[in-house]
Image (tube, helix red, strand yellow):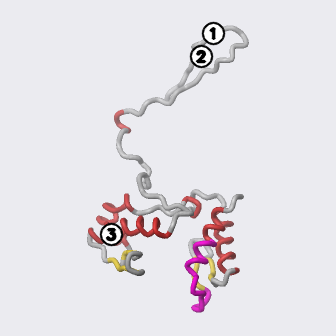
Amino acid sequence: MSALTACGGGSSGAGKAGDTDVASISRPAASAGSAGPSADPDSGRPQLRLDGSEEEHRKLNNAWVSCLRDHGVKTYTKGSAGAEWIFPGVNASDFPAAAKVCASKQPLQPVETDPKKNPHYADDFREWIRCMNSKGLKVVGLPDNAGWNYASTDQPANSDEIESSCRLEAFSAKK
């Protein structure tokens, strides 16, 4: 434990009653032992934006999955030419060496959709589910608010668009 003391200074009238100078404490410089990598495992990872385009999300996802593929993880591709999405064909954590090498490329989900960072996550999630259902995309939220399932196999042709617009509307609403 260390004690911090501070003295005011820099004023020609130091020590007089009524001085407005306030002592300040500056943060100590990092010691040579703490100059290593950040303790935050997410440091340096790409961050998806809630209002980011599908193209931006696709490029970041594909960079990560391509890295996994280059390190032995089976993948598959969906989508039309020039707009393909690459997905891991298995759980990437089943390949710990590849997962570790590629971890810095794995995109973080938008901050607004992270329950640990958004104090209104549960309310926003419920609003997302309500919005999708109101626009014809019939879904049921999971009890822990971790995701949702389709309520039926009969879904609108623009279900991806509905999901995306409702997600943006629900999670970006000002509280």
- Dots 2, 1 in contact, CB < 8 A: yes
The local secondary structure at tag 1 comes to loop
Point 51% across, 66% down: residue: 53
Residue 87 visible at all:
no
Q: Quadrant of residue 67?
A: bottom left
Q: Secondary structure at mark 2?
A: loop
Mark 3 element type: helix
Inter-mark Cα distance, 2 to 1 = 8 Å
Question: Which is more toward the observer, 141 or 53?
Answer: 53
Image disc number at residue 14 = 1
Report the magenta residues as a range. Answer: 151-166
* Residue picked out by circle 3: 66
Front-most of residues 65 and 27: 65
Indicate whether 26 appears above or below 83. above
Residue ID for mark 2: 8
Report, in whole angstroms, how far the alpha carbon at label 1 lies from the one at label 3. Answer: 64 Å
Q: Position of residue 161 (x, y in %)?
A: 58, 77
Q: Is residue 128 left or right of residue 58?
A: right
**Residue 127 appears in the picture as rendered:** yes
Crowd around label 3: few <14 · some 14–19 · many ≥20 (10 Å): some
